[in-house]
Image (spheres, helix red, strand yellow):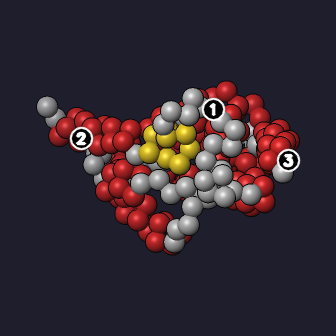
Amino acid sequence: MSDRLSQQIAFLTEADKLKSVYRATKVLDGHRKEDSGSHSWHIALYAMILAEHSNRDINIDRVIRMLLIHDLVEIDVGDSPIHGDHDIAAMEAAESAAADRIFGLLPADQANEFRALWDEFEGAESDDAVFAKSIDRVQPVIGNLETDGGTWPEYNVTRQQLEDRVGWKVAKGAPAIWDHLKARIAAWFDGRA
């Protein structure tokens, strides 16, 4: 077997570990927490289906590629729930080191390509990355709405937190989706009052 193929298989074997990283959000039937591997697949599907709602010209193939690799760093650092308490600078440093290690398993050309794509997603400045970030934030909101608030009560999530931590990111790349979700979010919070 060639060194290149051995490196690629080593990377793919390592990527399998993402299936064992559990997130704060539950799967829709509520029987367990979602794993990060499933999340990555699901938001890639979200992007394919919801691409028409992007307010920017996007390359959906690039968006899907970003979404499939964006959480690989969680193999080393775990999931950091958006509504959890954590040191953001320390988390970003740990994720960057994880990206170096994990993408470094690949042959140099693929390692550089995937790391650049991951950095682009994290930077969220290109049109593709802005939409990808929007979709990454949409799926957990829908998951929580579909499970009667899901883990929002556990994390004491408020409507304002959703707006501050999620809303503007979704609205930046897919404002029609955020407008739709805002109405559902308001109804959920109003129903708890």
As rendered, which of 120 and 40 lies closer to the eye?
A: 40
**Element class at badge 2:** helix
Q: Residues within 10 Å of mark 2 (few under 14, many from 20)?
A: some
- Quadrant in the picture for residue 58: top right
Say which amino acid is labelled 1.
Tyr
Against 193, residue 57 (above or below) is above
Say which amino acid is labelled 2.
Ala
Relative placement, left or right, of 44 versus 13 is: right
Relative placement, left or right, of 79 versus 54 is: left
The structure residue drawn at horizontal position 47% and vertical position 53%, both measured from the top left corner, is 79
Q: Earlier in the sequence, mark 1 or mark 3?
A: 1
- Quadrant in the picture for residue 139: top right
What percent of the width, then of the height, locates residue 80? 50, 57
As rendered, which of 115 and 68 lies closer to the eye?
A: 68
The structure residue drawn at horizontal position 69% and vertical position 56%, both measured from the top left corner, is 157
Relative placement, left or right, of 52 versus 74 is: right
Q: Nearer the viewer, mark 1 or mark 2?
A: 1
Circle number at residue 28: none
What percent of the width, then of the height, locates residue 74? 42, 52
Tag 1 residue: 46
**Element class at badge 3:** helix
Q: Residues within 10 Å of mark 3 (few under 14, many from 20)?
A: few
The structure residue drawn at horizontal position 66% and vertical position 52%, both measured from the top left corner, is 153
Q: Earlier in the sequence, mark 1 or mark 2?
A: 2
Say which amino acid is labelled 3.
Asp
Q: Nearer the viewer, mark 3 or mark 2?
A: 3
Q: Earlier in the sequence, mark 3 or mark 2?
A: 2
Tag 3 residue: 190
Cα–Cα gap, marks 1 and 3:
27 Å
Tag 2 residue: 10
